[in-house]
Amino acid sequence: MKDGFAGRFEQFKTNKSTLAFIVNHLNTNTNKINIEPFGIDAGSLQMQLLDLKTKDLWSGKFTELKSKLEELEVQKCMHIAQYKWKALKEISRVRALIFGAWNSLPECYNEVKKLAYGVLTIFGSTYSSEQAFSCMNIIKSKVRSQLTNENIESCLKLKTTSYKPDLIKVSKGMQSQCSL
């Protein structure tokens, strides 16, 4: 089991520079970044990163992002230590701040943005896939072996989407029946 984990996490070690790009892109060595999975032109990426480093507006934006993220972590730790779970939920979302900063870059930095979005979505897409397979295993148990593919597909869609019907609105539109 130990070897299995070591093998799985070995890839993180080899892609350390690529993963660190999100937080430290201004000091990243582009020769150590694995750009193959993202379909990025290495020359354009290097030129755009050099240009990005020289622009005080954009480098300042990411420095500000780093300080906001650090401040949020301190706030989270304080709320956790004081058992203030409701206050913890009210803290602005880290993902929104990170994606907001990367979205603010103009399209002239398209290769930099493509790499950032690729790295940011690695874990989310893996999580979604794992969640879907887990849900399918639960739905397609031995007890429910009589389900058709169409029914399994419908159950899986219900299980993996975040749709929440407005039950009050639906119930108002229905005619009630009185029992005698």
Image (spheres, rainbow, N blue to C red):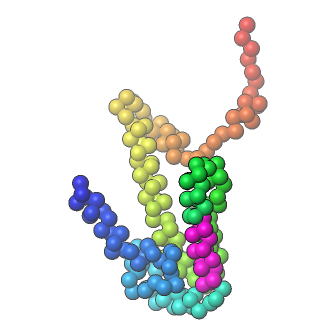
Q: Is 150 contained in the magenta span? A: no
Q: Which x, y percent locates residue 27?
A: 48, 85
* Visible residue check, residue 44: no
Say which residue appears at 43% left-offset and 58% top-offset.
Answer: 126
Image quadrant where residue 14 sits: bottom left
Q: Nearer the viewer, residue 35 or 7?
A: 7
Instruction: Estimate the x, y position of residue 57 in percent, counting from the top left.
Output: 66, 85
Instruction: Please state the extent of the stretch shown in magenta in the rendering.
Output: 58-72
Question: Which residue occupies the foreground of this view, 71 or 6?
Answer: 71
Q: Is residue 130 left or right of residue 171?
A: left
Q: Quadrant of the N terminus?
A: bottom left
Q: Is residue 20 visible?
A: yes
Direction from residue 114 to residue 35 in the image, left or right: left
Find residue 136 and report its horizontal and vertical position in percent: 42, 42
Could you tell me residue 29's position as x and y percent?
43, 86
* Magenta-span inclusion, residue 59: yes
- Residue drawn at (57%, 69%) of the image: 70
74 shown above or below 79: below
- Residue drawn at x 69%, y 34% is 167
